[in-house]
Structures are given as structure tokens and as C-alpha cells.
Image: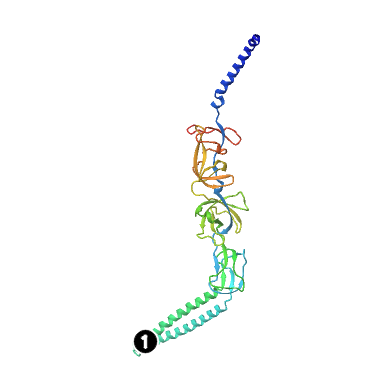
Amino acid sequence: MNRFQSASRPALGLLLTAALGVSLTACSPPESNQQKPPRPAVVVQPTAAEGQLAVYPGEVRARHEPALAFRVGGEVTRRLVQVGDRVKKGQPLAQLDAEDLLLQRDSARAQLTAAEAEHRNAKSEHTRYEELLARKLVGESRFDAVKTRLDASAAQLRQARAQLEVAENQAAYAVLKAPRDGVIAQRMVEAGQVVNAGQTVFTLAAEGEREIRIDLPEQNIARFKVGQPVTLELWSRPGEPYSGQIRELSPAADPTLRTYEARVAFDNSSADAELGQSARVYVQNTIGAPLLSVPMSAVTADGDSAHLWKLDQHNFTLVKTPVVVANYGNEFAQIQSGLSPRDWIVAAGTQLVREGQRVRPVDRNNRPIEFEVAGQP
């Protein structure tokens, strides 16, 4: 029994030493917690929001598009041109039934003939009475009456001439003529139709300057203004942009489409655009500070307030930054204020970070990002 106890003492000592070592190890703090490295964080820079560059389809139109109408009413007997026809100044376009107008002209001519005869008689009588007055054969009162008749006949003659001129003009108005060179853009009447004076019959696309007509949405009309620069492109010539500007904005919306018509003028007079060609107008439709686009995963919301986690590039810590979001999209959000294009923001895992946390910035391929510190070359 003494021999057994003597042999067990060394083994018991080893067990006590091992247990003590395990106990001391469990009580000491882990070395990894004392020297934990910064966690990697995927950071990106904001980009210009694509939504600012809006594209609107349009059509090449003439700068001047006068509406042509008869100055008198009547039945259209002849329509001499079609839509798309090129016309010259003074060329007849349509004609009215002028029978009544010609009768009025003939009546005015007859009245003029009668007025001329009356004036000749009054003038002859006035000449005779002048001689009689000189010989003291008539009194002053009688001569004044003759002179008054002469003056009245002269006035009636002038009136008859004016009435004949009006009647001749009215008869000439029965033929509608082109006021200038151009192309017939629209036709609103047919032969046999009765029209009123001033009712539009044709729309003429006058030769000369060309521009593009576009329709702007009602909800965005406040973003546009006259003189705003734009970029133009013809469908027939892709990749050949032209500079231009908004020349005209309609003050009222179209009652059917609820859009506002806009006219965009070419800055380059040698654009060589043909009427009716399709075109695209690129409009930078945000006035003021440009919008910045960031991934939706970078935006965090506290109630109604949105914020981003911005990287302090000096010490690689995170700063919670409130922002104003203009639009939310499927993949990107457009930031209106609170962010600059030179900032770096956390693009993923925003729910795992905290204010002042030190991170190791990496790109989406887990490669370290090097920054240019302000004040250093």
C-alpha cells in the first residue's frame, strides 16, 4: 500500500499542474480581442444621376407655319394642292364660288359709272354758273347751290371708286394664294365644303429655318425654361448631335394629352433637316445643383429621414450623414443634397456599421482603395 501511494504522487502532481494551466488560460483575455483589425467595407463614389438627361421624341417642323384661310366665305369649288406639295409665293391653292362676289363687283362698277356721269354734269353746270356770276346774271346764293352739288358729286365719285375697289378685292379673295414659298403641311377642307371667312384651310410650312416640336410632361414642366440649352439628334443621322435651345413653351397644356408643346431651335443654321423627320431632344431637365446617384443598398432610413454612411478619408472612420433623396429607383437613388461627387460612402452592409467605426475601405472586388489626402500632391 505504501509503494502504491509513493508511485501515484508524481502522476497526481502532473494532473494538478495541467489543471492549473487550463484554469489560468481560461481566465486570461483572448489575444484576438485585443488586436481585432478593422472590418472591410465596400465603398463607392456617387455618380451623376442618369435621370437628369431626359430624352424626348420630336418631329422636324418649320419655324413659321402660318394658317391659310379665305378672307371671304363661300363654297369651295376647287382644291388645287395636296399635303406635301411644294408651292411658290402667289400660287393658287383653292378657289371659292365667286358668282355673288362678281355680281357685287359689277354693281359697284355701275355705281361708279353713274357717279362719274353725275360729277361731269355737276362740273359743267358749275362752269356755266361761274360765267353767269361774273356777268352778274345770277345771284351768289344760286351759285353756292351749284357749287355744293359739284362737291357732293365729287364725294360720291370717290365713294363709288372705293366701293368698286373693295368689290374687286372681294372677288379676288375667292382665290386663295400662297403668301410665301413653302410646303403644304395640313389640309382642312375638301371641294364642295362651305367655309367661313378666316376658317383655316391649309397650314403652310414656310421655307427657311427648321426646328423640332416636342411634348413635355405636365408634372415636369417647371424644370424647363425658354433659352435652356439642349442637344438634338436626327434619327436618320445617329451619332451626329446638334446644339440647340428651347425657343418656345406653350403657356397651356393640351386638353387631351395634358402635355405642353415646346419648340426647340437649331443653333446651327446648316442642320439640313427635312420637314417631318423624326428627331430626339436630350434635355438636362434639372435646374440648379445636379442630382447624384447612389446604390439603393447605401441608403438607410430612420423614419422619414434618410442617411448614408460617409467615409472620413483621413482616419477611415464612418460618419452618419443625413441626405435629401429626390427619387427612389429599383437599383439607385437620386440624392438632391447632403452629398458631393468626391465623397465615398458605404455601399453594402450598412445595417452592421456604427458611428465612428474604423473600417478598411475596399471596392466591390475586395481590393484596397487608395485615397488622395487633401493638401498632399
Residue 120 lies, with reference to residue 222, above or below; the image says below
Quarter of the view holding residue 65:
bottom right
Query: Which x, y percent locates residue 230?
Result: 54, 51
Left or right, residue 377 beside residue 133: right
Residue 313 lies, with reference to residue 64, above or below; the image says above
Q: Nearer the viewer, residue 352 or 108?
A: 352
Query: Which x, y percent locates residue 56?
Result: 57, 53
Q: Dot 1 corresponds to which residue?
A: 143
- Report the label total: 1
Q: Seen from this angle, which residue lies furthest top?
A: 3
Q: Nearer the viewer, residue 206 or 144?
A: 206
- The reply to whether residue 341 is visible in this rendering is no
Say which residue appears at 60% left-offset and 18% top-offset.
18
Say which residue appears at 57% left-offset and 23% top-offset.
26
Q: Circle 1: is it few (<14), some (14-19), or many (20+) Cα within 10 Å?
A: some
Query: Which x, y percent locates residue 269?
Result: 55, 54
- The reply to whether residue 9 is visible in this rendering is yes
Q: How is the image coloured?
A: rainbow
Query: Which x, y percent locates residue 301?
Result: 52, 43
Q: Secondary structure at mark 1?
A: helix
Q: Seen from this angle, which residue lies furthest bottom?
A: 137
Q: Amino acid at mark 1?
A: Phe
Q: Nearer the viewer, residue 87 or 329?
A: 329
Residue 289 lies, with reference to residue 158, above or below; the image says above
Q: Nearer the viewer, residue 103 or 287?
A: 287
Q: Quadrant of the N terminus?
A: top right
Quarter of the view holding residue 191:
bottom right
